[in-house]
């Protein structure tokens, strides 16, 4: 392998200086003259019909520009989920509807000269509701006689609207009953994941305006600019060509910005008023009206032979999608498709479940995307199985996990809302990850020892996980690279850097291929008018999918450069190579700088712009793998759990930028620790969010974070750009089960519901089974 | 309407403020877009600025409070042409992911290092614990502050403005 000059090196983030010096690079950092403020009126009821809406008093208020509601906008069904095509989520949303389906649902929107006036206008809108019985418990959603949440006739793609089932899945491999009857040991576990939220520091925000050509420009904090364009076009009945979506720097997303939350309303207000309209959600609105992870109950039943070989796996999922079915089918599918292949030795598998509507906050995409909920249950069940078998849980995992050269029938059975595609694992360093993590946490010294330190009892636990790299045969990334006459390059990508550093990764891939430093590549990303298409930043796709597109485009540009240089040097292209910003003859050592190549092509001989585009659709989705180890201390007097140390070891193929990759892993782990120990959206009896602020919904602070050690164990993924796979999501799958298993190791208490709050831990400690 | 005088990043400012206007809104109105709004209720720390060198939440502080005081925003610490060592350290350590919490984090770190040039990792964690970050898990932010502290002790910080 040729020595790599840029790949694997800690180059400076291409957008680092503007971010670190606080330049105005985020959505709301520009001031447009004459901008109006848009605000949303939210439903106070979980389920109600709007009998009458009177906006006259609001409209009479000086400074109010317009009020939109179901009575004065077109009624077009669509989904707010920013996904590929065909859209797998049901069309069950409208710009405004005659009915509200959760506390926080959209009733109306106002554009006004100022925020104060807009707020006042919202108060002046008179709405008469006929309150309907609500579904506030996912278990009861499908019961006969339960209120029907989506009874509108024009919704489409709902699995069974009469029974409130947004989506369902049933996948069988082998014969599950035989599998369990042939097993020597069987365990069954049900784990619950509550409502948790992404909490990017920057809430959803957008500016929509008409440009000088009367085209609609949407500057928005999104992970999916091209899907925003397509969905807003549909929702407002506009030609797609009239819309331009610009994604500036994004203040975090984690999936919540894979959703059209404000863009449709802001666009409608801008079109109606012909004024720029600025909209932003408050933190409270984020909690009440944005998106959450799908709360789930996952039941896992495992059967194994005496020697520890897994023989049968059943996974049964009840997913709560809330009032709308956004991502309902695909998140549900992922609960199985991203977990079951990890234990590919079991010949008998039954994966089934449903996503139900409730009159509760709307779930959507969230880092991990169902896998996180699935792994919590699966990895706790594996721990229980190990105990019952009398095998070290680490050994049990080593005995059963998938390896390079192997496959799983699940790859073919479950895809993105449809059947999947067979694939063979080409790179897997999971075994090394497990062994390295065990060493770093001190597995054999600490496991089962219950070391005490006053009231604190220590324990260690582990979990393993995989994810994917993009969505097979659906995702698409495209890139254009053009050479400037000074020998530098412009890289245009539709890919969406939401803080992950993907612009930098993509620049590195281009730079390595073209034989220049990263500084010679300037990146422009995510502008539907000026960059090629990309499905967007989700499903751990950008490095692998968009990265491959950049690699292909860079190779084409390299060919062009060689052709021009061949004319200058008088040598055949086959004997030339790109090195340090020059084209050099491998035979004579004579060379020509890129600047000369670029200048000649643009101005002198056989004039042309050296420019190339390429697209990439992933024919497979190579999983990154990770092993997680937690050491916890449990205060047996108060039930408090402290994570003392957390080790995450991942195989993301070749890390293009190890420091950025570590950052993804660390960030995902800390979000996962937050889920495990602190985070839960509490709901009132009427379905409202009781803790819609960051005092009462606690995410980890720097003072909460334990000693975290992350390690990357490289593997070479042959289908990845320079051997790379993904890293963004896999890290969030491990903390909850690893911590749960560590708590069990410490105090013998099994926790099946997160967060592991002191009261839950304490009541476990005080239970008769544990006390004896 | 009333007019107030204060010092913003070393420059005198004499400006009108609206009744009840918060410092966050005034500063953004004056073009200091590094001052971020993440919650408006003092929970996240993204709007942190320095008042006479001490970190405050500008979303909870009335603009009128700035009267006669020195306000420092991230723009006052360094520029793209001439970044502050703390800004360099944040980039070198990989402490900037989305960058939305970065202005507040750097200002809090700046305050910490102004009175404690050799903080322990726990002291750094305590100092930044009022500023939320959802991207990094704080690991590399702590690294960055420790690196900047070392540079400061080694005399590598240029003369303060």
Image (cartoon, rainbow, N blue to C red):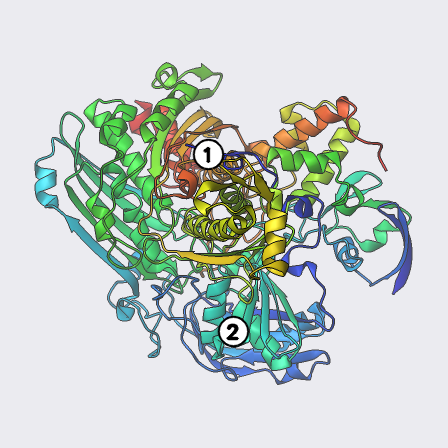
Chain to which the residue tagged by mark 1 belongs: A
According to the picture, the residue beneath numbered tag 1 turns out to be A758
Give the secondary structure at mark 2: strand
Chain to which the residue tagged by mark 2 belongs: A
Specify the quadrant that holds the C terminus of chain B.
Answer: top right
| Residue A522 image offset from top left, x and y in percent | 61, 50
* Mark 2 on the same chain as mark 1: yes
Q: Is residue A449 left or right of residue A312?
A: right
Q: Is residue A502 above or below residue A66?
A: above
Q: A300 or A561: which is nearer to us?
A: A561
According to the picture, the residue beneath numbered tag 2 turns out to be A107
Decide: few, some or many residues near mark 2? Use Cα within 10 Å; few <14, some 14-19, many ≥20.
Answer: many
Taking the spot 70% from the left edge, 71% from the top edge, the residue there is: A35
Residue A766 occupies which quadrant of the picture?
top left
Taking the spot 32% from the left edge, 36% from the top edge, the residue there is: A427
Residue A434 occupies which quadrant of the picture?
top left
């Amino acid at each position: 392998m040729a020595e790599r000059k840029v790949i694997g090196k800690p180059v400076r983030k291409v957008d680092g200086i503007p971010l670190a010096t606080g330049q105005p690079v985020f959505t709301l950092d520009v001031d447009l003259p004459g901008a109006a403020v848009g605000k949303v009126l939210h439903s106070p009821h979980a389920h109600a019909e709007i009998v009458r809406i009177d906006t006259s008093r609001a409209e009479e208020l000086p400074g109010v520009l317009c009020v939109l509601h179901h009575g004065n906008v077109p009624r077009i069904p669509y989904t707010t989920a920013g996904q590929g095509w065909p859209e797998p989520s049901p069309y069950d949303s409208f710009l405004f509807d005659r009915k509200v389906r959760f506390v926080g649902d959209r009733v109306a929107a106002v554009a006004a000269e100022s925020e104060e006036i807009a707020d006042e206008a919202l108060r002046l809108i008179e709405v008469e509701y006929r309150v309907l019985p609500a579904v506030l418990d996912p278990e009861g959603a499908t019961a006969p006689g339960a209120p029907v949440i989506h009874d509108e006739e024009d919704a489409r793609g709902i699995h069974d609207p009469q029974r409130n089932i947004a989506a369902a899945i049933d996948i069988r491999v082998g014969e599950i009953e035989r599998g369990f009857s042939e097993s020597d040991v069987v365990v069954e576990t049900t784990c619950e994941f509550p409502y948790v939220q992404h909490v990017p520091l920057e809430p959803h925000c957008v500016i929509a305006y008409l440009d000088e050509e009367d085209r609609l420009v949407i500057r928005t904090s999104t992970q999916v600019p091209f899907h925003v364009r397509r969905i807003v076009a549909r929702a407002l009945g506009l030609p797609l060509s009239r819309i331009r979506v610009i994604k500036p720097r994004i203040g975090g997303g984690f999936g919540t910005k894979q959703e059209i939350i404000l863009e449709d309303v802001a666009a409608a207000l801008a079109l109606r008023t012909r004024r720029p309209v600025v909209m932003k959600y408050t933190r409270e609105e984020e909690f009440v009206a944005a998106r959450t992870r799908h709360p789930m109950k996952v039941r896992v039943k495992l059967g194994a032979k005496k020697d520890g070989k897994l023989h049968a796996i059943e996974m049964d999922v009840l997913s709560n999608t809330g009032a709308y079915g956004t991502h309902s089918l695909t998140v549900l599918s992922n609960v199985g498709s991203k977990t079951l292949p990890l234990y590919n030795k079991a010949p008998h598998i039954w994966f089934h479940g449903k996503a139900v509507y409730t009159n509760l906050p709307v779930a959507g995409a969230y880092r991990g995307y169902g896998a996180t909920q699935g792994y919590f249950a699966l990895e706790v069940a594996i721990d229980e199985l190990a105990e019952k078998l009398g095998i070290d849980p680490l050994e049990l995992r080593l005995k059963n996990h998938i390896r390079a050269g192997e496959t799983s029938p699940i790859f073919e059975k479950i895809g993105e809302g449809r059947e999947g595609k067979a694939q063979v694992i080409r790179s897997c360093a999971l075994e090394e990850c497990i062994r390295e993590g065990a060493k770093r946490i001190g597995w054999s010294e600490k496991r089962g020892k219950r070391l005490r330190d006053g009231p604190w009892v220590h324990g260690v636990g582990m979990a393993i996980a995989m994810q994917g790299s993009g969505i097979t045969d659906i995702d698409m990334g495209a890139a254009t690279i053009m050479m400037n006459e000074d020998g530098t390059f412009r890289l245009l990508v539709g890919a969406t850097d939401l803080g992950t550093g993907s612009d930098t990764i993509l620049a590195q891939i281009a730079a390595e291929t073209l034989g220049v430093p990263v500084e010679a590549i300037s990146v422009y990303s995510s502008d539907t008018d000026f960059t090629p298409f990309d499905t967007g930043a989700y499903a751990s796709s950008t490095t692998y999918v968009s990265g491959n597109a950049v690699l292909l485009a860079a190779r084409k540009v390299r060919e062009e450069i060689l052709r021009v240089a061949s004319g200058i040097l008088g040598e055949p292209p086959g004997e030339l190579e790109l090195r340090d910003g020059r084209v050099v003859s491998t035979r004579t050592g004579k060379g020509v700088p890129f600047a000369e190549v670029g200048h000649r092509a643009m101005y002198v001989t056989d004039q042309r712009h050296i420019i190339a585009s390429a697209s990439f659709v992933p024919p497979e989705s190579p999983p990154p793998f990770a092993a997680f180890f937690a050491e916890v201390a449990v205060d047996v007097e108060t039930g408090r759990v402290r994570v003392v140390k957390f080790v995450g070891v991942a195989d993301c193929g070749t890390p293009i930028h190890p420091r950025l990759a570590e950052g993804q892993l660390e960030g995902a782990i800390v979000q996962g620790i937050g889920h495990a120990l602190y985070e839960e959206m509490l709901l009132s009896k009427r379905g409202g969010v009781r803790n819609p602020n960051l005092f009462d919904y606690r995410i980890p602070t720097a003072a909460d974070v334990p000693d975290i050690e992350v390690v990357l164990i490289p593997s070479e993924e042959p289908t990845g750009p320079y051997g790379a796979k993904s890293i963004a999501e896999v890290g969030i799958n491990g903390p909850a089960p690893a911590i749960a298993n560590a708590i069990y190791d410490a105090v013998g208490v099994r926790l099946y519901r997160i967060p592991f709050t002191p009261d839950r831990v304490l009541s476990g400690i005080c239970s008769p089974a544990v006390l004896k | 309407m009333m007019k107030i005088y204060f010092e913003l990043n070393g420059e005198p400012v004499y400006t009108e403020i609206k009744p009840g206007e918060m410092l966050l809104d005034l500063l953004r109105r004056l073009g200091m877009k590094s001052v971020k709004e993440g919650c408006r209720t003092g929970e996240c720390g993204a709007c942190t600025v320095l008042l006479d060198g001490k970190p405050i939440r500008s979303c909870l502080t009335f603009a009128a409070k700035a009267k006669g005081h020195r306000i420092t925003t991230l723009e006052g610490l360094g520029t793209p042409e001439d970044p502050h060592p703390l800004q360099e350290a944040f980039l070198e350590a990989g402490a900037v992911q989305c960058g939305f919490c970065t202005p507040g984090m750097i200002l809090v770190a700046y305050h910490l290092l102004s009175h404690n040039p050799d903080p322990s990792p726990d002291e750094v964690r305590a100092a930044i614990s009022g500023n939320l970050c959802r991207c990094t898990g704080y690991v590399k932010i702590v690294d960055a502050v420790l690196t900047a502290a070392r540079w400061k002790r080694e005399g590598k910080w240029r003369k303060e403005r």
